[in-house]
């Protein structure tokens, strides 16, 4: 077996540069901060530029279905940049999770997603892990009824993809947001604000039946891509803190020359390098449809979820008082990181799945229980 | 035409011819190794005439595999780690033609084992504080001092030695690098017993040791620069091919978990899975680093790898004892032994736990490695130093 490439290809580097240039041009931290006060005006034009002008909406959709036919490697590179900028766009929720849930269904929503004219969200709580049962709604005669809470990407969506319980398993229905009550909820991370959804006999169009595998694949890819986003968050925190500690002077010298601080950043660097390796491996394994893809995803999701939180917490502490202010962007990354840690499966859920996959199960034996 | 394949094919032909002319089974071991060196098949990336063919270093694996396949004797590389990994590249970088003629071949064949006389009781992390004196006496140098943590000193014929030749200049400027004969009557080697019970290392006392000036490596006062060439090679040794999942300590612990269902507890399982994931992260980081090096993007990330390795080895070996319960209370053997190499997996779990404590000290403490990462990788300002411009003689010791 040939070893998977864990580096960035030239194509991926070019894509990264394009996305980074656009984000640097269009998105300042103050626009993200403003979202915490309810100003979401940045979202729509920024997402249109990324989705339509750069064509990122159709990145993962096969060319035959109108997309770019790129792989998880390229999508992961995009996610890194979005994490690095704490970008408030629904790439992960629409172009990764929702897209994978419906790809290959033949439904018209796929072509609309590919063109970037429709944005979709899979209506499951953002905390849903790829391994457990998915909460389902009920459908009768083409209408869907029920509620789902804490859905990411719903506020930006035109179409909600609803997991529905059918006699012979799970189906996905597409419901236009105009037919649903989508209530924004104050969220820990307002750069990916959640919404509660209520459907009352909402007319929907059946996208596919026998959808359990599609939903699972969508959530799994979501977890893997989120790991790359978390690497981006952590990289920003590391780089920004290094820059700050080189400039900031106390006791007559740059505080970055103090071992107590530089060792913490060196530790963080080691972790960011490790996280990058795990996220790259997950992306490469998914792209190659490798048999190790699920293990790779669980490793990356478990490692990078905690990495991003550690990086943001360290960044805040090492910035001192300025890190605690509304004005400095470090809090945007802390909120993004902590929310992302709970998203698409907690690290403990990923490690639990991993334990089964690599034959390290925890089975409480009688001897164990008695202690 | 693919020139890379072409080179590999020609090299393979060369090995075939060599093996036809030197029967690996009937030829005397040392004669065989000397002939292999002379044929340029010892380390193919070395120059022609110096045991190599001036080829890319990654071609060596293919050559070694061919010789192993043919049942040829090897040069016991694990017994001469310092010689092969550190002395040889330093010789290539700074040695005179005469020095290369004299030392390279017996070094590679293992006829001469090397050790390293660098660290001292007063010069550990601060290696440039070496106090062992070398005083010129005509065409010779007379050396007096004490070295420590010297592995293989009891078997070595030669040593690379860092000594102070001028105490009246700042510490980095007054050092000189020598090749020292370990059979000199002024050398006394005393085993240093470790917490494991065995003795991998030695103290070496040098009293009136005489070294001819022809065995000086680099200029007088240039010792720090030459020593850095040696130490860089120490950290570059990340190793060859892909490492399979669950290699090393994590594999030992995973095996123990699978074999002992009765001792499973939720807290231990939590720690096991956390360390398993971290071990995979470290393994993949190493894989990524190897891929970078192969396309020529080298960096000082080797220091980061060593940090991860030390931490994991220590935490995993501690967990292994806890997984074992009662069995973890026993120890395999406290007898004073002098092993030629560290046999991590061949010994018991108690040994592994104790020996792993050295992983964050040997070859650069984790604290020094963190300084290296912070300063050379992240570009943070250097430590505040009080000894940089002060003559060595005037430093507080």
Image (cartoon, coloured by chain):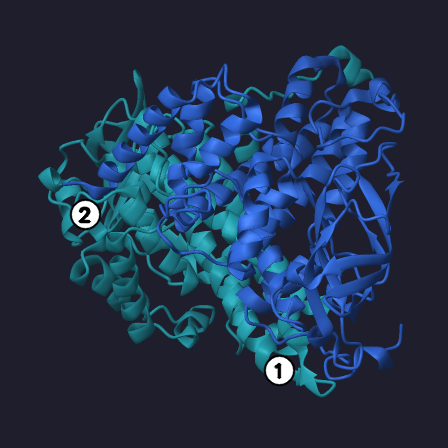
Q: Which one is in front in this view, the residue at disc 1 or the one at disc 2? A: 1
Residue at 36 percent across and 28 percent down: it is: B15
Image quadrant assignment for residue B126: bottom right
Q: Where is residue B231 in the image (x, y as percent from the top left)?
A: 62, 56
* Residue at which label 2 appears: A113
Mark 1 or mark 2: name the one nearer the start of the chain.
2
Display colour for chain A: cyan
Question: Is A70 on the left-hand or right-hand side of B379?
Answer: left
Image quadrant assignment for residue A334: bottom right
Q: Position of residue A292 (x, y in %)?
A: 41, 28
Question: Is B10 on the left-hand or right-hand side of B396?
Answer: left
Q: Distance between the residues labelled 1 and 2?
A: 47 Å
Q: Is mark 2 on a helix, strand or loop?
A: helix
Q: In this view, does A270 lie above or below A63?
A: below
Residue at 58 percent across and 60 percent down: it is: B229
Q: Position of residue A53 (x, y in %)?
A: 17, 62
Q: The blue chain is which one?
A: B
For mark 2, name the chain: A
Q: Residue furthest bottom?
A: A252
Residue at 52 percent across and 48 percent down: it is: A274
For mark 1, name the chain: A
Q: Looking at this view, is B22 or A191 the one in front?
A: B22
* Residue at which label 1 appears: A248
Q: Is residue A206 above or below residue B330?
A: below
Q: Where is residue A24 in the image (x, y as percent from the top left)?
A: 33, 73
Crowd tier of the residue under label 1, counting other residues whose Cα lies within 10 Å: few below 14, some 14–19, many 20 or above: few
């Amino acid at each position: 077996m040939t070893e998977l490439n864990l580096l960035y290809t030239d194509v991926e580097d070019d894509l990264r540069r394009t996305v980074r240039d656009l984000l640097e041009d269009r998105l300042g931290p103050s626009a993200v901060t403003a979202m915490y006060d309810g100003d979401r005006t940045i979202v729509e034009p920024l997402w249109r530029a990324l989705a339509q002008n750069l064509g990122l909406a159709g990145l993962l959709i096969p060319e035959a279905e109108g997309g770019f036919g790129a792989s998880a490697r390229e999508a992961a590179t995009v996610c890194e940049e979005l994490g690095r900028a704490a970008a408030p766009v629904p790439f992960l929720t629409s172009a990764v999770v929702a897209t994978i849930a419906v790809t290959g269904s033949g439904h018209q929503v796929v072509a609309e997603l590919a063109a970037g004219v429709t944005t979709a969200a899979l209506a499951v709580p953002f905390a849903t892990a790829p391994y457990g049962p998915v909460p389902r709604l009920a459908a009768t005669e083409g209408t869907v009824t029920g509620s789902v809470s804490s859905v990411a990407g719903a506020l930006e969506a035109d179409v909600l993809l609803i997991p529905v319980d059918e006699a012979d398993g799970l189906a996905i229905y597409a419901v236009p947001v105009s037919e649903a009550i989508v209530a924004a909820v104050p969220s820990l991370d307002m750069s990916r604000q959640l919404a509660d959804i209520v459907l009352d006999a909402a007319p929907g169009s059946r996208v596919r039946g026998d959808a359990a595998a599609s939903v699972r694949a969508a959530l799994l890819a979501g977890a893997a891509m989120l790991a790359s986003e978390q690497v981006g968050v952590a990289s920003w925190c590391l780089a920004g803190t290094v820059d700050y500690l080189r400039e900031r002077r106390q006791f007559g010298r740059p505080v970055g020359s103090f071992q107590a601080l530089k060792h913490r950043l060196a530790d963080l660097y080691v972790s960011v390098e490790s996280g990058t390796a795990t996220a790259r491996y997950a992306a490469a394994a998914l792209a190659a449809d490798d048999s190790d893809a699920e293990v790779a995803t669980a490793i990356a999701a478990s490692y990078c979820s905690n990495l991003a939180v550690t990086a943001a917490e360290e960044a805040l502490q090492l910035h001192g008082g300025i890190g605690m202010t509304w004005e400095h962007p470090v809090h945007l990354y802390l909120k993004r990181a902590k929310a992302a840690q709970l998203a698409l499966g907690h690290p403990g859920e990923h490690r639990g799945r991993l334990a089964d996959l690599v034959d390290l199960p925890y089975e409480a034996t009688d001897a164990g229980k008695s202690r | 035409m693919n020139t890379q394949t072409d080179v590999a094919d020609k090299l393979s032909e060369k090995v075939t011819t060599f093996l036809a002319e030197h029967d690996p089974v009937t030829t005397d071991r040392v004669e065989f190794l000397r002939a292999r060196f002379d044929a340029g098949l010892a380390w193919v990336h070395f120059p022609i005439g110096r045991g190599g063919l001036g080829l890319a270093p990654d071609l060596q694996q293919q050559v070694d595999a061919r010789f192993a396949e043919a049942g040829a004797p090897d040069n016991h590389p694990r017994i001469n780690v310092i010689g092969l990994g550190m002395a040889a590249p330093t010789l290539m970088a700074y040695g005179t033609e005469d020095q290369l003629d004299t030392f390279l071949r017996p070094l590679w064949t293992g006829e001469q084992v090397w050790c390293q006389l660098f660290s001292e009781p007063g010069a550990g992390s601060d290696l440039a504080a070496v106090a062992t004196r070398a005083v010129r006496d005509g065409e010779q140098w007379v050396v007096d001092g004490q070295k420590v943590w010297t592995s293989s000193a009891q078997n070595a014929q030669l040593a690379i030695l860092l000594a102070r030749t001028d105490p009246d200049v700042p510490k980095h400027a007054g050092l000189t690098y020598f090749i020292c004969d370990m059979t000199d009557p002024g050398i006394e080697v005393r085993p240093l017993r470790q917490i494991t019970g065995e003795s991998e290392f030695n103290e070496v006392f040098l009293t009136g040791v005489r070294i001819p000036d022809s065995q000086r490596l680099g200029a007088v006062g240039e010792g720090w620069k030459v020593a850095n060439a040696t130490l860089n090679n120490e950290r570059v040794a990340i190793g060859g091919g892909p490492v399979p999942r669950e290699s090393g300590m994590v594999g030992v612990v995973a095996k123990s978990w699978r074999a002992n269902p009765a001792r499973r507890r939720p807290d231990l399982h939590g720690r096991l899975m956390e360390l398993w994931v971290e071990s995979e992260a470290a393994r993949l980081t190493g894989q990524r680093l190897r891929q970078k090096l192969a396309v020529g993007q080298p960096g000082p990330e080797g220091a980061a790898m060593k940090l991860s390795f030390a931490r994991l080895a220590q935490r995993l070996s501690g967990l292994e004892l806890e997984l074992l319960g009662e069995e973890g209370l026993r120890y395999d053997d406290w007898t004073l032994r002098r092993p030629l190499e560290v046999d991590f997996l061949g010994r018991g779990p108690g040994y592994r736990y104790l020996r792993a404590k050295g992983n964050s000290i040997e070859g650069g403490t984790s604290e020094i490695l963190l300084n290296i990462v912070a300063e050379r990788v992240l570009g943070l300002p250097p430590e505040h130093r009080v000894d940089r411009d002060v003559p060595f003689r005037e430093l507080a010791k």
